[in-house]
Image (cartoon, helix red, strand yellow):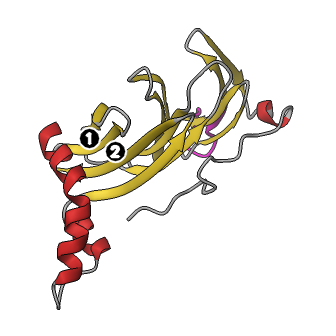
Amino acid sequence: MINRIILLFFSLPLLAVNVMAEENALSLRQHLQQQGVLYFQHAALAEKDWDVLVSQHREGNTILLYDNDKRKPVYQFTLAAPTDTFIRLQWLELNGFEPLLATVWQRGVHGEQFILLDPSEQKQLYRLTSSWPLRFSACKEGIAVTIMKEGETADAPLQETHIWHNPDSIEIKNGEVAFCSLVESIPPLDNDPKPASL
């Protein structure tokens, strides 16, 4: 599986040349979609050069983080459920960490999940699932993720805010908490809070 993704990753520039060379070719975007590519982003952060590729396969949606400085993939995971689909990602700079990657995925019919990745340490730091769409904000001191949980009745879901400072410090509060409004919120590093997928 990873070999297939790596091959696709390295063949992206060649695909662009081949697609443009054909007279009646599909657009590059259509060609990438046919190859299962949902999203691609290049980011130069903290003196590191990263590429992120999100692709869709029979096995599920896969995110691959590629360290261009080391010229190799450093982290990959697959969400195996067919309803777990990619929504968006955002690079974050928090105190005490190299840049982190916050990702949001569809979970089931109307739920979402938040997954925080640390590319430099090649691991997942935090994962949180919501029964309904979630919201998150980030500031230098941490991340606040507000989720909706099933309440006593379907008409009354419960709000809960998880404040993540580091893997050992997570606060859970009822309702929505204006944690990051106390300090300046971090703008997305790519200036696009919800990048359009391919």
Is disc 2 placed on a helix, strand or loop? loop
In the rendering, at what x and y percent does residue 60 appear? 23, 44
Residue at 17%, 91% in the rendered image = 23
The residue at 34%/48% (across/down) is 53
- Around disc 1, counting alpha carbons within 10 Å, would you say few (fewer than 14), some (14 to 19), or many (20 or more)? few
Q: Residue at x 17, y 43 (%)?
A: 59
Extreme top residue here?
168
Position above or below: 107 against 145 = below
Assign a secondary structure to mark 1. loop
Query: Type of residue at label 2?
Result: Asp
* Mark 2 neighbour class, 10 Å CA radius: few under 14, some 14 to 19, many 20 or more: many
Is residue 67 shown above or below 197? above
Q: Decide whether the magenta segment is chiefly helix, strand or loop.
A: loop
The residue where tag 1 is placed is 81
Q: Position of residue 31 (x, y in %)?
A: 22, 71
Instruction: Say whether residue 77 is visible.
Output: no
Q: Marks 1 and 2, Cα distance to the nearest angstrom?
A: 5 Å
User: In this view of the protein, which residue sits in the foreground, 152 or 168?
Assistant: 168
Q: Is residue 34 left or right of residue 54?
A: left
Q: Amino acid at mark 1?
A: Ala
Decide whether residue 107 is among the magenta residues: no
Q: Residue at x 72, y 40 (%)?
A: 186
Q: Which residue is mark 2?
A: 84
- Residue 168 position within the rendered picture, expressed as x and y whole percent measured from the top left: 58, 8
**In the drawing, does residue 194 fall left or right of residue 125?**
right
Asked if the residue at tag 2 contacts the one at tag 1, i.e. Cβ–Cβ closer than 8 Å, the answer is yes
**Quadrant placement of the C terminus:** bottom left
